[in-house]
Amino acid sequence: MAKLPNMLSLWNLLVLSLALNVSLILRMVSESQERYIGSSCFKKQGDGHVFHEGSLTISSSLSSNFANSSRANHPQGNGRVINLDHGDPTVYETFWRQMGDKTTITIPGWQSMSYFSDASNICWFLEPELAKELVRLHNVVGNAVTDGRHIVVGTGSSQLFLAALYALSPPDAAEPISVVSAAPYYSSYPSMTDYQKSGLYKWAGDADSFEKEGPYIELVTSPNNPDGYVRRSVVNRSQGLLVHDLAYYWPQYTPISSPADHELTLFTVSKSTGHAGMRIGWALVKDQEVAKKMTKFIELNTIGVSKDSQLRAAKVLRAVSDSCVQERRFQGEESFFKFSYNIMSQRWKQLRATVERSGMFSLPRFSPAFCTFFTQILEPQPAFVWLKCEGEIEDCESFLRRHKILTRSGRHFGVSPKYVRISMLDTDENFMQFLDRLSAIQIQS
């Protein structure tokens, strides 16, 4: 019996040793799997997404999987709220998925480290590759004069809008310069202008009713957001300064009549190609001093603009221009603008048919015009619907919200709440649900 404790001690040691060995083996297996998983993150994955160790590789459809998974988490059918308040341009996702690796870029870890892109340029943070592709695209489309213009790049056209106000405002004026735009104007103009309570400029409302003497800045959006009509300045006084916002002056939205030739013009990648997440916009500026002041504003605001986004935008714009050239050279090829024009055309036909059957709503009517890009007479098909509720419905936004359609009221655009703005740029699924809801409203009524 005296040997029993010794035997138990040996047995305990054996069990302990075995447990330690098993634990060590499991740990080694776990670490091996973690290393494998970590390294596999840098291998090619679906939809042309490629990641390399020490480099950043991005595809034009990089965020698509996230968007799709987000949509999958939302319940489908009539119980789902359809948000068409904002202009998120996911309608173009299909085209860019088809492009595959043509718009994929690889950015080595050592690239784009400096603040500076071209120190000899007024806009010293503008990537030369992006500047080249912007000029090429405007020449291919024929929608803007680039000769004799300075290009200023910004984090979306929103930053450039504020930079333009800063550059055009007199620095030593006794009071802020008035900023106006003809109603219905872009809903963010008033809040963006007055958000920082600048002493340089101040929102002064509808350009059609502006009577104050002295200098002013008029914002001209053409085609107009929200109603889609072609716009020109309306105040037309000697001390006026103009900013032309041409975010939607592209062939899928409106006939291109001639190259825009203005003092200061704003464009954005988000509405031209659908890549809103890049946050890239650009201004074509005739006056050198204005370009310098706009550049200074962006320098003080964000110390430049992301080089990675600029390089990605350059690759996407090159693909757009190439698709246009290929379409003209070879039968059967479809350019980005032809693809997007066909989508917008089909959507507007479906919407007009639905609205005409309802008798409860009305839509703007547009005059056809010759498009120099497509070389034929075409009708505008804007990125937004300017819908009016007829009859006794006074608050169209609230009325549609009761039917689980989110829109933006006309009061945000300086006009009657009988109007709402509705995005035409959402997914096919949401757009078809929207048409179904409008039809259902007619049946219920």
Image: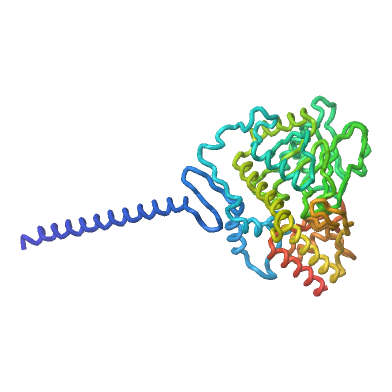
Q: Is residue 445 above or below residue 333?
A: below
244 horizontally vs 25: left or right: right
Task: Between residue 233 and residue 441, name the one nearer to us.
Answer: 233
Q: Is residue 226 above or below residue 345?
A: above
In the rendered image, which quarter contains the C terminus? bottom right
Residue at horizontal 88 percent and vertical 64 percent from the top: 390
Res 86 seen here: no
Residue at horizontal 62 percent and vertical 62 percent from the top: 71
x and y percentages locating residue 73 in the rendered image: 59, 63
In the rendered image, which quarter contains the N terminus? bottom left
Q: Dividing the picture into quarters, in which one does residue 106 lie?
A: top right
x and y percentages locating residue 321 in the rendered image: 70, 48
Task: Between residue 414 and residue 107, name the one nearer to us.
Answer: 107
242 horizontally vs 306: left or right: right
The structure's colour scheme is rainbow
Q: Dividing the picture into quarters, in which one does residue 428 lie?
A: bottom right
Task: Between residue 72 and residue 266, name the one nearer to us.
Answer: 266
Q: Is residue 333 above or below residue 258?
A: below
x and y percentages locating residue 94 in the rendered image: 65, 59
Res 346 seen here: yes
333 horizontally vs 399: left or right: left
